[in-house]
Image (spheres, helix red, strand yellow):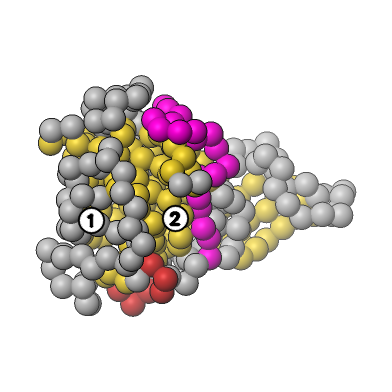
Amino acid sequence: MKLQFYAIFYSVLFAHSTYADPINLIDYSAIDVGSTIDFNSISGGSAPGTNYNNILTFGEVLIGGGGINIGERFQGQSLSYSGDSDILSASASSELQVISGSPNQNLNVFNYSGSNVLTGLGRQGFPSGNAIGEGSVAILFDTDQSQFGFQSVGGNSGSATFHFFRRDGSLIDTITPTELTSNSFGVKRDEGVRDIAGISIHNTDPGGIGYDNFVFDKQETALLFREKGEDDSFWGRFGNDIPGFDHVGLQLSDEIIWESHPGYDTGTYTDPT
């Protein structure tokens, strides 16, 4: 990956209009930020940095709705190659689930100009410079979103492909920005619809691209019900339990509910109403 970092907002060319489409380009600075995810909380180091073969989790997963999981692609997406670059299909399984890549071909983090940067690892594998920034990245949000943005490192006038998925795995839209030569990117769902559950990104930029400072519009959760236990002195998640409450339901989005109940598996389900 040939590193460059540009301090201006870029303009990009799309394969379709940036107005009244399912996904539209906006300035990074215009995003109504609810959550910011950087990568300074995990190990990086000087390039090539630290290799991660696992799914990376950041933020307030479930409680608060500001969490994300990052891997190589979504279950059901096919992976192919163009030179050293990963290429992902626009189809995913019916229940959106992020998965990791092969060992040394998943994700890495390194320090650049005092900040950790995330990249996908291509087929050449870590620690090859021809792998860093060439791999695909898939981002699964804990709650459905309407906006997303990031700051980029690298970019040598190449292009990238973004697939936007709903939680049921259906495709919302695909956009293909070109002339990747600066440090910010933002998108917004048409009419502010909150149904972006996941985004996959792959690129064919000659030097690859890296990512920093993911921003999105975290949706606050709503407490649907609670059954109080013996101690209700505090409210907060401890593992998969909420101390002081035996049975809790949280509305995470218009359709998704998270529930914790003693003796049963904790998790999310779709509201039948």
Q: Which residue is mark 2?
A: 214
Q: Quadrant of residue 21?
A: bottom left
Q: Main secondary structure of the magenta part?
A: loop
Tag 1 or tag 2, which sits nearer the N-term?
1
Whether pointer 2 and pointer 1 mark residues with C-beta atoms closer than 8 Å, the reply is no
The structure residue drawn at horizontal position 35% and vertical position 31%, both measured from the top left corner, is 106
Asked if the stretch drawn in magenta spans residue 47, the answer is: yes
Answer few, some or many: residues within 10 Å of disc 2's Cα (few below 14, many 20 plus, some between 14 and 19): many
Query: Please, what is the three-letter code of the amino acid marked with disc 1?
Result: Leu
**Residue 243 visible to the viewer:** yes
**Residue 171 visible to the viewer:** no
Asked if the stretch drawn in magenta spans residue 73, the answer is: no
Residue closest to the far top: 103
Is disc 1 placed on a helix, strand or loop? loop
Pair 2/1: label in front: 1
Q: Quadrant of the N terminus?
A: top left
